[in-house]
Image (cartoon, rainbow, N blue to C red):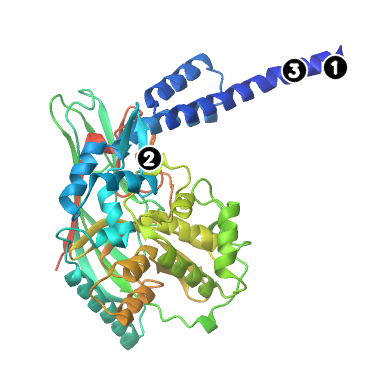
């Protein structure tokens, strides 16, 4: 009798686990078949019929449904749309090439309700990834002016640091303006919209930060050393009108240049101390998978010097990863593995891959970023920092290594090498840094799912626990020299 009771208890406990496994299998199968609406319905029914599920599992399932809602925004192009784009920008393009490139895995697409839909930046990504297609581009942009200006600026930063023996040089005062507009009638009249806007974090290279004005008046400004510094505002929605938020601030930014002597770098076990969190994995996006462990070992080999380890990772990314515009990070299970598996990604993918490989190799590394705005190069942007004794935290921009190695066309090899070297440990002043960590928690706490679950560059908004996604609002920002 006792044995029968034990078996019954096991079956009662095992059934919910089996059912949960089954629901995830159904969701995955339906998504692969492009039946996103059916998958969402399965999730809703399961949640309604299983109210006693643990809160963590309910949240996981609700976000799975939210993710399915977001996927169509990342893949909006029909075959006809993409063909039209390719015909307008690629010399002697033939329709059959689309099928061939798709067969070769050169295009990102998914099925949505039985129709093939391509990633929003498919044409641009073909130019980034494949030199032979890039060579056929009609009326390519001329980036030579930007490349020359960046080279001259970085050379000046190096010269100024060497002449002054200072690490922070070429200070520049900046004036920033940011605004967010929620589309009319997205939020019911009278309901309160909550808004978080990125704001400069205090750093030795980012100082004298002053909020000039915000509309409406800010209710909270996060503390200067917040890992995700934000300005918090609220406003009630009015029928037929956009809900608007804006702010202006000024700050001083400095270029950084650290003259590192690798022979003076000290090998330290960082796994047992205040820097231990920066050598630890933090799933889902910084996970020490078997694939990344093997790769880190291949890259680093027998090297023991932490600075040289980080440089080997940086150079491997420059050689082996190509730039591509990305779908939103919130729909990706593991961003660093995404970059590893595909060998392409944007600045954030490259930064997280660098961070993960460094941490596996025992080198402390962390996220950094928000905006960059060197003349003619305004963009949201992310990079990384790594830590070595006795120099402390050093910036590292894997994207700039890829840019220098793979994309620059107007500079000679020595000049491109200089830029690749510069962005390992050094940085321009033309940036605004709000983030010192990825996947950090906003304050006051956001009740709904984040639009960007990894990064914080374009603000976050919600009303009564309902997220206001990117497709329901517009965001504008501008940073100009203040003097």
Report the residue at 51% width, 76% height from top.
Answer: 390
Residue 88, x across and y down, in percent = 15, 49
Camera-side residue: 181 or 220?
Answer: 181
Residue 3, x across and y down, in percent = 85, 17
Q: Quadrant of the N terminus?
A: top right
Badge 2 crowding class, 10 Å Cα cut-off, few under 14, some 14 to 19, many 20 or more, is some
Task: Examine the image and state in which quarter residue 257 appears.
Answer: bottom left
In the image, which disc is placed on residue 201?
A: none
Labels 2, 1: front one:
1
Residue 321, x across and y down, in percent = 41, 60
Would you name the residue on which mark 1 appears? 3
In the image, which disc is placed on residue 9?
A: 3
Mark 1 or mark 2, which is nearer the start of the sequence? 1
| Secondary structure category for the residue under label 3 | helix
Camera-side residue: 432 or 151?
Answer: 151
Farthest residue toward the top?
1
């Amino acid at each position: 009798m006792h044995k029968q009771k034990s078996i019954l208890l096991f079956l009662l406990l095992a059934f919910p686990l089996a059912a949960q496994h089954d629901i995830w299998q159904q969701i995955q199968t339906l998504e692969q078949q492009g039946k996103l609406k059916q998958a969402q319905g399965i999730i809703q029914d399961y949640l309604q019929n299983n109210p006693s599920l643990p809160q963590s599992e309910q949240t996981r399932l609700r976000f799975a449904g939210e993710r399915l809602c977001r996927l169509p925004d990342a893949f909006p192009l029909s075959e006809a749309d993409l063909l039209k784009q390719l015909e307008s920008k690629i010399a002697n393009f033939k329709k059959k090439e689309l099928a061939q490139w798709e067969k070769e895995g050169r295009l990102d697409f998914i099925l949505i309700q039985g129709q093939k839909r391509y990633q929003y930046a498919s044409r641009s990504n073909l130019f980034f990834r494949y030199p032979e297609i890039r060579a056929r581009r009609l009326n390519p942009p001329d980036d030579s002016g930007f490349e020359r200006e960046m080279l001259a600026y970085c050379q000046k930063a190096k010269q100024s640091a060497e002449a002054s023996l200072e690490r922070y040089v070429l200070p520049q005062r900046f004036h920033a303006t940011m605004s967010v507009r929620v589309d009319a009638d997205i939020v019911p009249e009278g309901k309160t919209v909550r808004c978080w806007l990125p704001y400069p974090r205090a750093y030795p290279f980012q100082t004298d930060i002053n909020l000039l004005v915000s509309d409406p008046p800010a209710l909270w400004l996060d503390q200067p050393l917040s890992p995700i510094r934000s300005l918090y505002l609220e406003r009630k929605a009015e029928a037929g009108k956009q809900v608007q938020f804006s702010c202006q601030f000024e700050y001083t930014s400095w270029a950084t240049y650290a003259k590192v002597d690798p022979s003076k770098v000290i090998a330290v076990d960082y796994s047992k101390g205040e820097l231990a969190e920066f050598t630890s994995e933090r799933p889902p996006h910084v996970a020490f998978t078997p694939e990344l462990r093997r790769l880190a070992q291949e890259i680093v080999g027998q090297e023991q010097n932490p600075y040289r380890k980080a440089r080997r990772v940086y150079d491997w990314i420059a050689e082996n990863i190509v730039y591509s515009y990305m779908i939103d990070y919130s729909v990706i299970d593991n961003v660093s593995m995404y970059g590893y598996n595909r060998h392409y990604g944007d600045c954030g993918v490259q930064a997280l891959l660098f961070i993960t490989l460094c941490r596996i190799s025992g080198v402390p590394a962390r996220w950094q970023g928000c905006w960059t705005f060197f003349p003619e190069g305004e963009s949201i942007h992310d990079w990384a920092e790594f830590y070595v004794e006795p120099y402390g935290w050093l910036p590292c921009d894997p994207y700039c290594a890829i840019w220098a190695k793979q994309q620059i066309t107007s500079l000679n090899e020595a000049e491109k090498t200089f830029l690749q070297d510069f962005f390992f440990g050094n940085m321009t002043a033309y940036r605004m840094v709000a983030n010192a960590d990825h996947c950090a928690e906003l304050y006051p706490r956001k009740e709904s799912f984040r639009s960007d679950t990894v990064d914080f560059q374009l603000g976050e908004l919600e009303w009564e626990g309902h997220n206001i996604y990117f497709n329901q609002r517009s965001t504008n920002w501008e940073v100009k020299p203040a003097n």
